[in-house]
Amino acid sequence: MKWPRPFGAMGRLATQLVAVLVVSSLIAWIGISSIFVVLSPESLLFLSPTATRHVVSLFNALHGLEAVPAADRPRLLFAFQRPDFSANLTDAAPSLPSNQLETEKEFRSWFLSQLPPGVDLLGVFFEGRDGTVVARLSDGQLVVFRVVRDIPHFLSLPIVLVIAFMVLSIVLLSLWAVLRLAAPLSRFAAAVDRFGADGDDESVLREEGPEEIRRAARAFNRMQQRILRLIEDRTRMLMAISHDLRTPLTRLRLRLEDVSDPKHRQRMQDDIALMDGSIASAIAYVREGGTREAPEMADLPSLLETVCSHFEDAGHPISYEGPRHLTVQCLPLALERGISNLVDNAVKYGTSVTVRLDASQADRVSIDVEDDGPGIPDAEKARVVEPFYRADEARHRVGGFGLGLAITATVARHHGGTLTLQDRAPRGLLARLTIPSPLPQ
């Protein structure tokens, strides 16, 4: 289920676990409290510690009065005198208020059951905070209790202790849930995203957490090992093929010296150069797929001017436009190969090439390679960056395996950037390689 944006935090496992713990704890607390009150009416006294103390004193006084002789009763009651609780013996019925306190039937039954045998409760009366409780002993003597009650508070000490215990339990259970479930899942997701993206392909995910998460981590580690073995086997096979092909190519170059016809010799040399370049591009693509080059600070204009100089030495018209110095954190060798591929494509199809560096944006830098060639149809722009794909125009005019743009796209991905192809006015192609912005100088 995809949560709306205002409730996006509920999409996280840790938040859902905490919510479940809070709701279930509240429901359990309300349910247990309700059952406790129904089955034990005396629990209502917990809402007021003062009322609890008054009731205990009243029961103790009545039990004591029943147990001692009548002459010792005044001395016994003196021990129960407090500012908020007092008791007096009387033979005549006192004047009582008309507002007798109404109590629940369950609580009244429990209260009467706690009285000594033969003692009757005549009434409980209150005017504001002052209350009067009248009881008749088994010998007919009346006892009048004067009490001062407090105002019951919902958050009394027992309730506060229960809430504090519940909050502490929720916090501890939430920490356990996050450490036991959410944290291993987060590490698992990070390992999946990191695999094959930052060169740390040999890291092993720790098998921790519940059994299901440990099984998923174990399966991921096995899958990672299988993929790495496949990549290693592919690389080893390609290296072996390139070695086996370059050996006969070297012999063919030597035998070309025996070909007397210059025209045929040149054609054969071109074919050999095409095969050699195709092999080199395939090996470069495999290497870029798993580059282990460490990022470092490099002067980007110097790197671009070096690439331009190589092609100028080969006789291609090319120019550089942009700042003279700009330090960025990058993979210099990989970035040089990627730009070289873009420039190589540009000089194959165009007669004039411009390499432009744009650092005007705050969060990125762009490297544009422009040519005045025929360009690429919009329908094929997304496909030409795929490995081994070549447009119809390229199949007729140039050779190769169609890996140049694929290698550059891989380089851009290693930098966290993008490679886009755009039409250039009035004609030609603009290949833009965008990488994160440079660090402050």
Image (cartoon, rainbow, N blue to C red):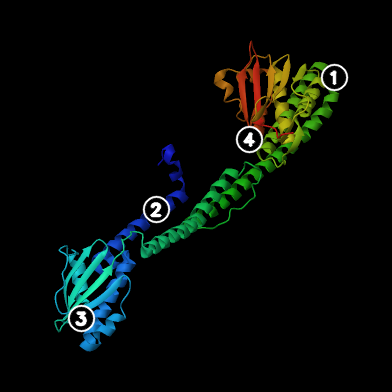
Name the residue that disc number 3 marks: 116
Q: Earlier in the sequence, mark 1 or mark 4?
A: 1
Tag shown at residue 260: 1
Q: CA separation, marks 3 and 1? A: 134 Å
Q: Is residue 402 visible?
A: no
Name the residue that disc number 2 marks: 20
- How far across and how far down the image is residue 250, in percent? 80, 32
Which of these two is toward me, 262 or 208?
208
The residue at 31%/76% (across/down) is 81
Q: Is residue 15 visible?
A: yes
- How far across and how far down the image is residue 400, in percent? 68, 26
- How far across and how far down the image is residue 97, in percent? 17, 65
Q: Earlier in the sequence, mark 1 or mark 2?
A: 2
Task: Kindly identify the amino acid type of the residue bearing the numbered disc 4.
Answer: Gly
Q: Quadrant of the N terminus?
A: top left
Q: Are marks 3 and 4 in contact (CB under 8 Å)?
A: no
**Mark 1: few/some/many CA within 10 Å (<14, 14-19, 20+):** few
Name of the residue lying farthest toward the top: 426
Question: Could you say whether the residue bearing mark 3 is in a helix, strand or loop?
Answer: loop
Q: Quadrant of the C terminus?
A: top right
Name the residue that disc number 4 marks: 416
Which of these two is toward me, 72 or 380?
72
Task: Single out the mark in the foreground, 1 or 2.
Answer: 2
Task: Kindly identify the amino acid type of the residue bearing the numbered disc 3.
Answer: Pro
The residue at 30%/78% (across/down) is 80
Q: Earlier in the sequence, mark 2 or mark 4?
A: 2
